[in-house]
Amino acid sequence: MARPDNKGGNRRDREEDNEFIDRLVHINRVAKTVKGGRNMSFAALVIVGDEKGRVGFGKGKAREVPEAIRKATEEAKKTMIRVPLREGRTLHHDLRGRHGAGKIIMRSAPPGTGVIAGGPMRAVLECLGVQDVVAKSLGTQNPYNMVRATFDALKQAESPRMIAAKRGKKVGDLVSRRSDGASAPEAIEA
């Protein structure tokens, strides 16, 4: 099922089994020079997610584009990771990821912000199910390194429940609750 907001000719969005959506991020035509000429093949980079906190990526290579996409999708389903989301819409805290020359920064955002991210990072975050996030890619524009850097950051994501379990405390001890009538800090007199 194609989405109306899908832009560009090198991305694809379709639903399989009503469980996962997959997004084609990049296709590369690869030529191997042999004695009789060149052997052409295609390499595909695919992101798969359930829009509920699980996402994975895979690479596939074959003589035909559909076969490369199928291989990439199968690999992506095998390598899925779970990421804790706050209120099912954003990240719990700021994240930084790196892979090779690819560096990325992701920040949680208030409701209504949307997904502010570019290229391959946007595909990962949309398949993950994040609705409000601000992300920036620093360094390389190589889609493979950007996706790996994004996954490096997402693997570091932790929820207050996970931190509380590690430290042997209750979630309420770690997270402060704000009341509606919270007063501003008083000014320090000089």
Image (tube, rainbow, N blue to C red):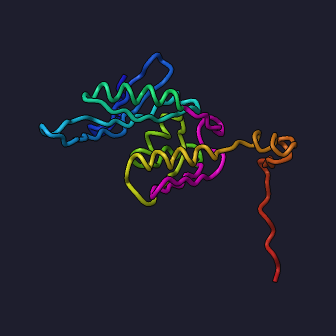
Residue in view at x 37 percent, y 25 percent = 70
Q: Closer to the camera, 31 or 101?
A: 31
| Residue extent of the magenta highlight | 80-108
- Would you place residue 77 above or below residue 113 in this image? above
- Please identify the quarter of the rendering in which residue 182 is found: bottom right
* Residue sitting at the far left: 36
**Residue 93 point in image, percent of width and height:** 65, 50
* Residue sitting at the far bottom: 190
Q: Closer to the camera, 108 or 55?
A: 55
Left or right: 55, with 15 as reference point? right
Residue in view at x 59 percent, y 38 percent = 89
Number of numbered labels in the structure image? 0
- Would you place residue 58 above or below residue 103 in this image? above
Residue in view at x 65 percent, y 39 percent = 86
Q: Residue 62 colored magenta?
A: no
**Residue 103 point in image, percent of width and height:** 49, 57
**Residue 30 point in image, percent of width and height:** 25, 41
Q: Quadrant of the N terminus?
A: top left
Q: Quadrant of the C terminus?
A: bottom right
**Residue 137 point in image, percent of width and height:** 45, 55
* Residue sitting at the far top: 17
Residue in view at x 39 percent, y 47 percent = 143
Left or right: 109, with 169 as reference point? left
Left or right: 186, with 19 as reference point? right
Q: Residue 103 colored magenta?
A: yes
